[in-house]
Image (cartoon, grey):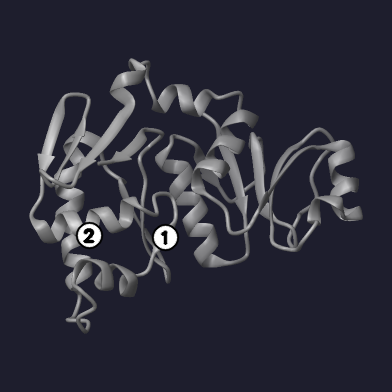
Amino acid sequence: MGICCVKIGDGILRDYVTAALEMRGIRCTEEMNGSDVLCCCEDGIPEVEDGAKVVILYRRPRYTRSPAYAAISERCRCTAIERPFLLEDLVNAVSEMTDGDAVRIQSPAVPSEEKILYLSREEMCAEYAGCSVRFTEREFRLLEALAEKAGSPVSREKLLEEAWDSMESRGNVVDVYVGYLRKKLEPILGKGAILSVRGMGYAFETGGKTLRIR
């Protein structure tokens, strides 16, 4: 199993990255002792040994051309990802640096045609590998709103607007319905299909499956 040391000062971003990596079988730690990969922001790169593997999340334009990046990339194996980023890009970058072990462990061999997750608007259901789960109209509208932004967090306000026709917020109705979705999706996607991203809302994760909405 791959190990990633997450060194990111922003608590929200750190939780977001950690949850995404661990869902794909990449164990996260705050210590660098023996870690396979270091994941950090461009403004908080700690001291690393020569030959280390580093994923840098940056937000300044042309950061990869900066002297700081050039200096560390000369002695370390580096990958730079621009913020905001897709979770899949980050997970793939870390997985490649751990020689793909995490992906192989988390995703056992499955025929390619069975890796497609279908969401059917007409039948209001989700289908994967021959299994089908049906939803109420409200549940499906919420799921569709999350799926259309798969891999990225969607705010509670946006979900309320999409699934409840812009009506004013009524307590924790979005959180309650996300709980319903998690229970229904667990048999086909396992736990962690919908991540809570602190301060940002919820993110739908397919776990490497191809998503098709029809």
Looking at the image, which residue is at 56% across and 35% down? 92
Q: Residues within 10 Å of mark 2 (few under 14, many from 20)?
A: many
Q: Residues within 10 Å of mark 1 (few under 14, many from 20)?
A: many
Q: Is residue 132 above or below residue 194?
A: above
Residue furthest out toward the bottom: 168
Looking at the image, which residue is at 13% across and 61% down? 138
Q: Earlier in the sequence, mark 2 or mark 1?
A: 2
Image-based side of 135 in relation to 66, left or right: left
Q: Position of residue 52 (x, y in %)?
A: 76, 36
Q: Position of residue 63 (x, y in %)?
A: 80, 56
Amino acid carrying mark 2 in the image:
Leu
Element marked by disc 1 = strand
Amino acid carrying mark 1 in the image:
Pro
Q: Position of residue 90 (x, y in %)?
A: 57, 44
In the foreground, 160 or 24: 160
> Which is closer to the viewer, label 2 or label 1?
2
Compute the Cα span from label 2 to label 1. Answer: 13 Å
Q: Which residue is mark 1?
A: 153
Q: Which residue is mark 2?
A: 142
Res 165 → quadrant:
bottom left
Image-based side of 10 in relation to 27, left or right: right
Looking at the image, which residue is at 81% across and 33% down? 51
Element marked by disc 2 = helix
Res 208 → quadrant:
top left
Image-based side of 159 in relation to 24, left or right: left
Q: Is residue 79 above or below residue 204?
A: above
